[in-house]
Image (cartoon, grey):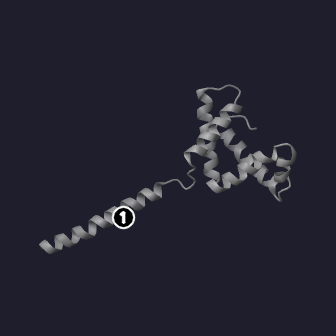
Amino acid sequence: MKHLRAAVKTLIVPLSLSLWAGASLAETPKNDYPTITRVEYVVACMRDAPKASQEYMYKCSCVVDKIAEQLDYDEFVKESTTSNAISIGGERGEVMRGLKGGRQVARTFRGIENEARKNCFMKPK
């Protein structure tokens, strides 16, 4: 009986730890962006807001969270970079404007961003 209890303990403890570890991994958001990316987005969003206030900090945070529900981090980087770079004047912007499908990528991102802004009680861009 003593050996049976020891055997059960040696099986249950690692099993329970592995289940706990698996559960914590499953709870990790799929589209978790680095904190710095979220902060940079919120700061830029607040800069463009009609008035800097705590209200816009919450609204801008909401927007980046809604975007993260739609795009994984790599898609966000690609689409937001393309969208921002297309608006640059001159030769630097022309590189992105000349990118095959670049304008469509920018339109897609702006659509996702505008939908997120509406959901967070902000005017679309």
Label 1 sits on what residue type? Ser
Looking at the figure, which quarter contains the N terminus?
A: bottom left
Residue 100 x/y as whole percent? 83, 59
SS for callout 1: helix
Q: Residue at x 58, y 28 (%)?
A: 54
The location of residue 15, given as percent across then percent down, is 32, 67
Query: To which quarter of the image does residue 118 belong?
Result: top right
Instruction: Indicate whether 23 appears above or below 44.
Output: below
Q: Residues within 10 Å of mark 1 (few under 14, many from 20)?
A: few
**Which residue has dot 1 on it?**
18
Q: Nearer the viewer, residue 45 or 91?
A: 91
Q: Can residue 85 be seen here?
A: yes
Considering the image in quadrants, where does the C terminus appear?
top right
Whether residue 87 sits left or right of residue 68 in the image: it is right
Please say whether residue 121 is visible from this viewpoint.
Answer: no
From what the image shows, is residue 82 above or below residue 54?
A: below
Name which quarter of the figure residue 55 lies in.
top right
Residue 88 in the image: x percent, y percent? Answer: 81, 43
Q: Is residue 68 left or right of residue 113?
A: left
Image point (68%, 25%), residue name: 51
> Residue at 76% across / 48% down in the picture?
83
Q: Residue at x 63, y 40 (%)?
A: 40
Measured as percent of width and height from the top left, residue 123 is found at 72, 34
